Amino acid sequence: MSEDLVNCGKGEICSVDGTDRRKPCNDIRNAAIKGNIGDIHAGMYCPEGRTGYENCPAGYYCPTPSTKFLCPQGYFCPYKSSDYTIECFLCEEGAEDMGRNLVGLVCCLTIFVGLVLYSVFKLLHKLKHESEENRKSQKNKVLSSDQQKEVRAKEQKRLGRMTPILRLVEERIKSKWTEASDVKIHELDNIFEEDDDTKLKFNSDLLYRFLDADFSGDLSFTEINEVLELNKSQIQNFITTMNEAGGNFKKKKSVDKNTFIDHFLNTLEYSTNFGVSSDEAGTLYDELLAESGRYAGLSQSHFHESRKLGDFLDSNHIVMLLEGFRTKREEAGVLQNAKKYPIKRAEFVEWYPSVLEDIMNEHVERRDSFKEIPGIDLTFENLSLSIPLGGGDSFNVVDEVSGRLKEKTMTALMGGSGAGKTSMLNALCGRAYYGEVTGKIFLNGIEVDMDQHKSIMGFVPQDDIVYAELTVRENFMFSGRFQLPSSTPRTEIETLAENTMANLGLSRVADSLVGDVRTRGVSGGEKKRVNIGLELMAKPRILFLDEPTSGLDSSSADLVMKSLKALVTNQGVTICTVIHQPRKSIFDMIDSLVLLGVGGKMVYHGPCANAQKYFEREGWVLPMGDSAADWLIDISSGRLERGTIKNDTKANLGIQRKFEIEKLNRASLCNYWIEYFESLDPAEKVQYQPPDATEIVDRTGKPSFLRQFIIQLERCFLVAYRNRLTKVVDSGLIMFAAFIVSFGSTLSVATDNDPVVSFDTFYSINPTRTIKILPEFFKYSLNAFRALSEYGMKMGVILSVLIGLTATKILTSKRVEFFREAKSGYNINAYFLAVNVISTIEQGLQIMMAALVGLWLKNTTTSVWNYLVNYLMLSWHCVSWALFLPLLVPNQNVVLVVGLFMSLFGLLFSGVLSPVQYEELYNNRGTEIFSAFVSPARFFIEAMMVSEFKCLPQQSGFTSNASNAQDFPAELSSFALLNLGSNDNEITDVSCGGWWWFVLPSFLVGLTIRFVAFGTLHISDRGQQAKLSVMSEFTGKNKNISFMISCAAMMAIIAVLFIATCWVIVN
């Protein structure tokens, strides 16, 4: 140290040129104040032997140039502090940085570890459950020898129980035929006998021969009742039950031989379970209780799961049984629902016999009552569907077909590949918006536009589009609440759901998740029936189905078709279904057939039973043992020629020649049908013409927008809860990313950079010279910009990508479900608003977790509320784009597009990096507006830095005091030098409450994007929503005025929002 500086005291600076000049530091500080440029030297510290001052070190505050004090506990003093003003709850006395919240850090790690452990636990539990299910499935596939013995023992036990009844039947037969000379009386002993091993045997074939007195091949009510001696309703129910068991829905007053032989004993046993005494009811209850493994009563689920009850009660009966118990409880003054509270033994013994009798009588009455319900008759004349090919050309996929779907019947659309089966189905139900439909359609004899009668129609798509996260019951309940009139009581919807599940044989899996490829759920056949049940919850009078048996094994397909046939028989629903290669049992259930050839031309239409005779009359021969359905499809495709048995006549011909022959065959088929139809008698042609006009009763009172919005919210919350494992993993990844980004040093708003200014400059200091070197005095705070902007950019861009990708899932994962519901008339505005609310809440919570990680690890000088709101606005902006972009791109490209969009625009237009930095942003209004919209990190990074810097005192250069800085040049403030917050005229005001200017533009930007998304939802993928294209709505034959008004209103709202947002951004 030079001799001049040895004598330089504290609180002054000295020269080193031998002139012994000295300058009190207070004079330097006061000169700036007197020059009206502010107290820019506050926090200066002048120790002994200095030619210039240094900034007060971190952890201290320097009220005067010659004094230095430790920063008290609970406060943080950055470099160049003249007082302690920044509160810091975690700071000890003299803390040099803001420190980390160790308690918060432990909480953060605990939460993260908890999320990981929960995810691992759920995955292990899932694997264990799937392993057990697979083991049970394999175990049930093969019966061991012991199990086979058990099955045979049960059969013997069953015959033992039936012995008294069968002996009684035997005695009645003997008494009737004792005097008959043409009957071998001794053969009666062979109907029911015991062999040498005392094993019981029952010969139903022999019994049938004795009962069929008129040798007609069918047993009538009278013939069967001569040995059963039942009353009229009982014998009617007995025969109906036997026919239904045999899949024979057409015969109602008699039973054929095969049905009797196969199902008489089961039906008889079934009937013996009715008319029980109290003692028998008590015995049954004990058996059910033992079967359930319960001791406190029988629950609703066990009634449906019970094999014992399932032997003689179907799902409909069980639903009615539970309803009967509920009614009995109400009559007894017990306010407990049988569906929720277990049935006690005393209740069961007292009520079961009477309830069971009421059920059987009501079941018969209910089945007969459906015959009186008016059905829907659909007739189509010259129906065509043309698809535009471009250049003004078009191609007919359905070509002038005419026919009729009679009320309360099941009609099948069949044909080979390219026959236009699905296209015709879409044309019939008004969903062929991808082409032009011509021709006439009549409902109950009245020419209609099918779009005007969607309330009485149901459409079941080929794919099983259901909510996999919901149970069967929940899927049905939500479907009913969305589609039934708003005045429908919830109890009525619950009853309808119970009955629908019962009719479709789904009661036993009512509370099972439907599931998908990722989550085990119901079987394929059950899922197909759930798919059908969703439409039945709207109480349609006519139901269209696109290949309901596709992808199912023969047994499951048979169950599905039996359920559909029961809808026709028991509820009077008219059904039209596309079906491909049905097995014989399914083909026999079909009432009417529409057989199409290639190009959508009619090949045959009429009763299914007459199809074979029609083509045999024209010269085709059905090979012995072949399926009639497959044979018909081969004929319609042109692959079979008249007079041939097998499809091998063209085996040695060239491909071109084969094609020409098949084309000629198809043309001749259409001509045969036209000639045949023209040759029909007028009385026969009536069957293909519209019936006399009758009233069409449409359902009215669809739930309001608000009601549907609430229901959508409820369902979204439930789905989110069921997907909680995925949410946990997403949240864990977001927290982990925030942890990695924030784990470095704590927040720094000032650096250790003393001003490098010569003694001569300080000695002759004046306001003019001081202004020229202001950045030198502010560089200790200016240099903090780089570290803070880097942290903000990392956090902003990474969170933008993660939050954006997470938010897209709510749309992409339920896209096909949305399209199905849009086709069914659900309010898509209510859906999209609910999605907005759920996404905003869900992603808001996730980003709050990330914000807390950053807060605990990095800390902040500003208000915690301002800090959190900044993160919330980032989430709001990201979610807005995440709900808009998936509407523009295919599902498979959403992840790439959203990830690229968030990262690319987040980096290039955030204002931190070239080529678009804050100076370029604020000097070009277009760039400023564009960056505000496309870069979610744009406001986030700037708000983070401005909020932190605004808490610094005047000497930092970021803030000023109007009372002593009137002449401070605004262009040299630290905010101006960094080009931050240039549109905020009050940005230099000191505030540790944070910078709130960013909130309004961020909110308006997100709101504008969401309204654009609302509009896009209505104009994109309109074909998938069963709606005409926008161009057709505006320029078609029947212009949609309401749609045009809605579009104009939406565009006006978006325009107003956009203008207001732009004004806020630039002002």
Image (spheres, rainbow, N blue to C red):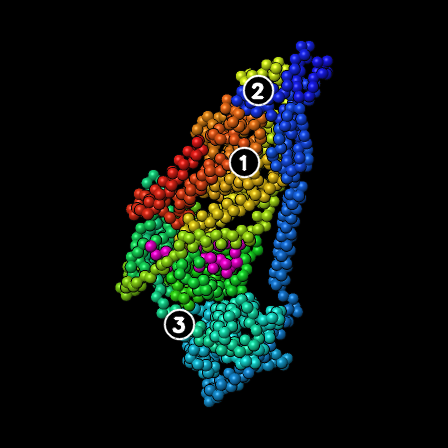
Residue named by callout 2: 31
Q: Is residue 112 left or right of residue 1016?
A: right
Say which of 766 and 359 sits in front: 766
| Crowdedness near tag 2: few (<14), some (14–19) or many (≥20) residues, C-alpha within 10 Å | some
Residue named by callout 1: 994
Q: Position of residue 1028 (x, y in %)?
A: 36, 47
Q: Residue at x 61, y 37 (%)?
A: 87
Magenta stretch: give its range.
Answer: 452-480
- The answer to whether the residues at label 1 and label 3 have Cβ atoms under 8 Å apart is no
**Callout 1: SS:** loop
707 over 201 or under it: above or below: above
Q: Residue at x 51, y 44 (%)?
A: 808
Number of labels in the image equals 3
Q: Report the amino acid beneath label 3.
A: Asp
The CA distance from mark 1 to mark 3 is 75 Å
Asked if one can make out residue 1013 in the rendered structure from this viewpoint, the answer is: yes
Residue 368, disc: 3
Q: Report the amino acid beneath label 2.
A: Ala
- Within the image, what quadrant is residue 133 found in? bottom right
Q: Residue at x 61, y 15 (%)?
A: 763
State the quadrant of the N terminus: top right
| Crowdedness near tag 3: few (<14), some (14–19) or many (≥20) residues, C-alpha within 10 Å | some
